Amino acid sequence: MKKIDIFNKLRTSGLRPTKQRVEIAKFLFEREKTFHFTVESLNKLLEKKTTSKFALATIYNTVHAFKNAGHLSELEVKGNKTYFDTNVSNHHHFYDSETSELIDIDEKEVVIQKIPKAPNGKKIKNIEVFINLKN
Amino acid sequence: MKKIDIFNKLRTSGLRPTKQRVEIAKFLFEREKTFHFTVESLNKLLEKKTTSKFALATIYNTVHAFKNAGHLSELEVKGNKTYFDTNVSNHHHFYDSETSELIDIDEKEVVIQKIPKAPNGKKIKNIEVFINLKN
DNA sequence: TTTTCACTTTAGAACTATTATAAACTAGAA
DNA sequence: TTCTAGTTTATAATAGTTCTAAAGTGAAAA
């Protein structure tokens, strides 16, 4: 993803392309594979991989802004840290609780034959499958 | 579940049946339907429904002891509170993110036709399906 | 029974993740 | 260049959870 695309991505989301947002966006979105992270891990990686300095609050702000704009999704993971995913399409996950490692599973890789119908007046928004792993 | 059963449940788990543990166990396990809760909600309910007083730390201790003994399972729910479930058998959930409400789905109600194989040397421990709801 | 002691409870401190605050800064329109 | 709303920043505040160490208690042994 080129710099101009990052700018557009931000602008079309109503986010002014500041130095910090551009740099974080480049780090998150200029990659082949999807990326799973917590704010803490992202902070450490940014410290290592960039020369800029980011206030922790900025990382929180930016991650939430990206999430609200639909560029990141939040994952359901046990424990009290919030995990994010650069893959915002419908998909599933392998989860290794021993290492806290998440691996994406393409939606097509999982076929569900039967599900119950939604309760009283509710509709199904989406289905998420977690395949928990052991050694 | 009778008092003697609660005592046995605790003792066979290596947990001395103290006043607090017995009362919390009765509250959690003497019910027909499964029960989903956070430590905070459990604390409030215990305040309301019992005459005893429990230190918050005791509730944390007890819930963790029950979880380690296999009498409670921990749920994957977005946000930073930990959810517990008195249903420890393999099963699935409806989840309404607007109300944070969870509803159990019996394992037999979900049939999966196809899943990918586990990565490099790992095995599949179990599969959890979340059906997210909207109005 | 009474004694004993490892296990448990308790209140409060400490810790971790996250959000709020308010002052300084900045992108970009005018 | 000036101006301003939006943004970043350091720090304080909050929320959920865990730690600590002193006091309390089940239950085994005397």
Image (cartoon, coloured by chain):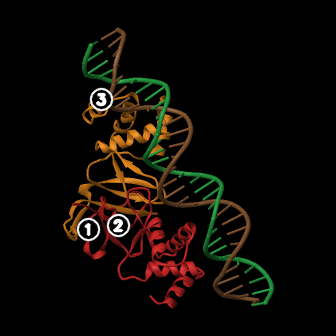
Chain colours: A red, B orange, C brown, D green
Vertical arrangement, residue C20 with respect to residue B55, above or below: below
Tag 1 subunit: A
The numbered mark 3 sits on a residue in which chain?
B
Question: Can you see residue B38?
Answer: no
Query: Residue B54, position in %: x, y?
Result: 47, 34
- The residue that mark 3 highlights is B7
Above or below, B41 against A69 in this view is above
Secondary structure under the numbered disc 1 in the rendered image: strand
Find out whether the residues at labels 1 and 3 contact each other: C-beta distance under 8 Å: no
Cβ–Cβ below 8 Å for labels 2 and 1?
yes
Q: Find disc 1 in the rendering and name its residue.
A: A112
Q: Which residue is label 2 attached to? A: A127
Gap in Å between the C-alphas at discs 2 and 1? 10 Å
* Residue at image location 42% in from the left, 42% down from the top: B60
Residue B130: give its label. none
Q: Measure the alpha-carbon separation of dots 1 and 3.
A: 42 Å
User: Residue at coordinates 44% horizontally, 70% vertically from top-left?
Assistant: A73
Q: Nearer the viewer, residue B63 or B129?
A: B63
Q: Quadrant of residue B65?
A: top left
Badge 2 amino acid: Ile
- Count the marks: 3
Tag nearer the camera, 3 or 2: 3
Report the amino acid beneath label 3: Phe
Looking at the image, residue C29 sits to the left or right of residue B74; the answer is: right
Q: Residues within 10 Å of mark 2 (few under 14, many from 20)?
A: some
Mark 3: few/some/many CA within 10 Å (<14, 14-19, 20+): some
